[in-house]
Image (cartoon, helix red, strand yellow):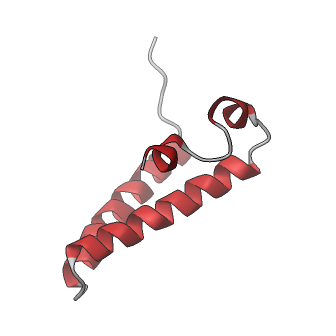
Amino acid sequence: MTKKATPSGLFEIHIAVLLFGLAGLFGKFLSMPAWMIVFGRTGFAMLALGSVLLASRNRHWLKIHGPLPCSVCWA
């Protein structure tokens, strides 16, 4: 049995494709070095994912990994 795609799922896919395409264009038109763009995008992703993890009600990940992500501990 196959499930039909819901209209909201198709809309989310189209938004994701649009955002990925715009990210490449903005990176091309910025007059900053590539390492600075990558560092900024990585920092923004870290803050966004960290806030989602802190806002989630499931704190099981905190018991397993401790207060810092493994990537920070290994750096």
For the view shown, which residue lies furthest in the front direction? 74
The residue nearer to you, when weighing 33 against 67, is: 67
The answer to whether residue 3 is left or right of residue 27 is right
Residue positioned 67% across, 34% down in the render = 61
Q: Is residue 30 visible to the viewer in this orientation of the structure?
A: yes
The residue nearer to you, when weighing 43 against 3, is: 43
Q: Position of residue 5 (x, y in %)?
A: 47, 34
Residue positioned 56% across, 45% down in the render = 69
Q: Position of residue 60 (x, y in %)?
A: 73, 30
The residue nearer to you, when weighing 33 against 68, is: 68
Q: Position of residue 40 (x, y in %)?
A: 40, 72
For the view shown, which residue lies furthest in the top direction? 1
From this view, report whether residue 71 is shown above or below residue 47.
above
Residue positioned 68% across, 45% down in the render = 67
Residue positioned 48% across, 52% down in the render = 11
The total number of labels drawn is 0
For the view shown, which residue lies furthest in the right direction? 57
Q: Position of residue 35 (x, y in %)?
A: 25, 71
Q: Is residue 7 visible to the viewer in this orientation of the structure?
A: no
Image quadrant in which you'd find residue 63: top right
The residue nearer to you, when weighing 60 against 16, is: 60
The answer to whether residue 35 is left or right of residue 54 is left
